[in-house]
Image: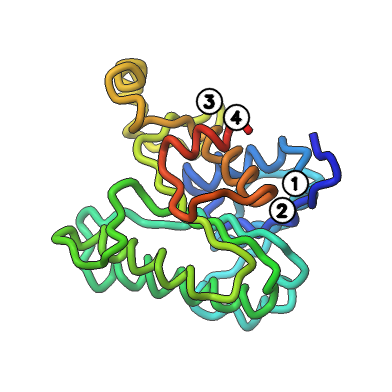
Amino acid sequence: MNTGRKLLKVILTGATGMVGEGVLHECLLSKEVESVLVINRKPCGVSDPKLKEIIHSDFFNLEPVKELLKGYNTCLFCLGVSSVGMEKEVYYKLTYTLTLSFATVLSALNPDMTFCYISGAGTDSTEQGKVAWARVKGKTENDLMKLPFSAVYNFRPAILEPTKGLHNTLSFYKYTGWLLPIIRVVMPNYLTKLSELGRAMIACAVNGYSKHQVEVKDIKILADS
């Protein structure tokens, strides 16, 4: 329940993917969230009094919708792609270039904004490691931190347990979901519920957090706060 803290006016990306849909679901349930503006390439298929939607095809050029992005205090950036089977240059463009392009516009429009970025466990903050995707994610995190936002938090989930009843759960989970209870016991620091990730992002935007790289154990702490 909100007790005089700021209500969140959220811009959310990635709502047509599993993670973004799950985070959006938690936003619509949360009393801390006043409104949500979803920006997508296609409709997310969700209707709610809190929700507005912009359909925009080119995330590298926000000029046509720029005026509609003013007046928000939170961005939950859940848009992302897997590096599996993707050329390094394409992955870099769709991960680093797209994210920084989008965030740079928002930071100029809403300098009091808190920006929460879905990164990933194993991200390389040094940008010097052997794993290409981890270097790209690390560079993305590092350069987001340089933008003139009120605060930036980089969330690093590992294995996510889907939220039941949502539409964009990856088919992978239909065949491996039976493993999740085992992982929860054997590797508890690698598994979080998608609902916990959403609640953690909301809590972080409302209250802040002591760390800017938010690992699995931090997500669980924030989700229960």
Amino acid under label 2?
Val
**Horizontal and vertical percent position of residue 151:** 59, 63
Q: Which mark is residue 144?
A: none
State the CA–CA distance, disc 3 to disc 2: 21 Å
Furthest toward the front, the residue is 210
Query: Considering the image in quadrants, where does the C terminus appear?
Result: top right
Name which residue lies at 38% across and 70% down: 96
Q: Give 165 or 136, whichever is nearer the viewer.
A: 136
The nearer-to-camera label among 1 and 3 is 1
Amino acid under label 3?
Lys
The nearer-to-camera label among 4 and 2 is 4
Q: Give the SS element for disc 4.
A: loop
* 10 on left or right of 222: right
Name which residue lies at 27% across and 64% down: 126
**Horizontal and vertical percent position of residue 44:** 60, 50
Task: Answer above or below: position of 160 versus 90.
Answer: above
Q: Report whether residue 58 is seen.
A: no
Choose top left, top right, bottom left or bottom right for residue 111: bottom right
**Horizontal and vertical percent position of residue 144:** 47, 69
**Horizontal and vertical percent position of residue 17:** 48, 47
Q: Which residue is mark 1?
A: 33
Q: Give 195 or 44, whichever is nearer the viewer.
A: 195
Amino acid under label 4?
Asp
Choose top left, top right, bottom left or bottom right for residue 108: bottom right
Q: Which residue is mark 3?
A: 164
State the CA–CA distance, disc 3 to disc 4: 20 Å
Task: Answer above or below: position of 133 versus 32.
Answer: below
Chain-order first, disc 3 or disc 4: 3
* 118 on left or right of 83: right
Task: Answer above or below: position of 180 versus 56.
Answer: above
State the CA–CA distance, disc 1 to disc 4: 17 Å
Q: Which residue is mark 4?
A: 224
